[in-house]
Amino acid sequence: MKSKIRYYSLPGRIASIVLFLILWMSCSAIVSEASGKPLSVGIAWSNVPDSYSYTSTIRAVKEAGGTPVILDMVKSYDLNYDEEGNLIDAKDERGILASKAAKLVKCNRWQNSNAAALMEGIDCIIFPGGWDISPTLYYDRQAWHGIEEDSDYSAERDVSDYLLLSYCLEQDIPTRRGMQMLAIVSGAEIVQDIPQWFAEKGVEYGYQHRDREKKGILLSCYRYSES
């Protein structure tokens, strides 16, 4: 498969630099807690390890003086996986985690997984940016929002992040990023699709996304006005 070359405008490059600086400062704050001793910083498993968010996270940890440790996928012993790590009979055609599988993950959490073994020797963990999270994992389960062009899901990533974050919370392991999954594990109310949520309230909502392959525009810019 040929790699894709992306060309960014000046605003796009500025946004990329800002993102890297935020990552670097966040990682520096973690590493400074070790009183000069390099921390083993776990990088949560991703189904897209070549993404900008993932590679920038690894680079930021190194620049901050930490030792990045790329973790394997956290797997639930309640679910079945094939040899390549794909879930078997536990997700739909869009990659959304099935309701029954989500219930098992939420009920048994990290205790019935390999999370503890993967975290041995890890001082803290960073959850890189990811795709949409399966709505079946929400505290109040929701149906898929039905937007065909916005259906990026990975049930494997959802299970892995959910179990790993639940372990970190119970074991008091310092974490960075992963705020959406943190909210879900903690039982917060989640808005599945922001534009749709505004539309249902009769409010106009327009935005631009920095990933032009996903939204056709480079920078994130959110705005809304009363209709």
Image (cartoon, rainbow, N blue to C red):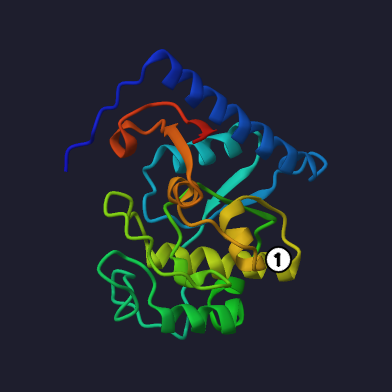
Residue occupying the point 49% across, 36% down: 227
Q: Does 179 appear above or below 3?
A: below
Q: How many labels does the image show?
A: 1
Whether residue 99 sits left or right of residue 22 in the image: it is left
Q: Most extreme residue toward the top, as rendered?
A: 10
Mark 1: which secondary structure? helix
Whether residue 37 sits left or right of residue 60 in the image: it is right
Between 104 and 37, the residue placed more toward the observer is 104
Q: Quadrant of the N terminus?
A: top left
Residue occupying the point 29% across, 69% down: 84
Give x and y (percent) for residue 95.
32, 65
Give x and y (percent) for residue 10.
42, 13
Q: Name the residue under label 1.
A: 169
Residue occupying the point 52% across, 79% down: 105
Between 97 and 67, the residue placed more toward the observer is 97
Give x and y (percent) for residue 81.
34, 78
Residue occupying the point 38% across, 26% down: 218
Whether residue 48 sits left or right of residue 160 in the image: it is left
- Residue 218 visible, this orientation: yes
Q: Most extreme residue toward the right, as rendered?
A: 35
Residue type, mark 1 in image = Leu
Residue 140 occupies which quadrant of the picture?
bottom right
Give x and y (percent) for residue 78.
46, 86
Within 10 angstroms of label 1, few (less than 14), some, or many (20 or more) residues? some
Residue 111 occupies which quadrant of the picture?
bottom right
Between 77 and 91, the residue placed more toward the observer is 91
Between 54 and 33, the residue placed more toward the observer is 54
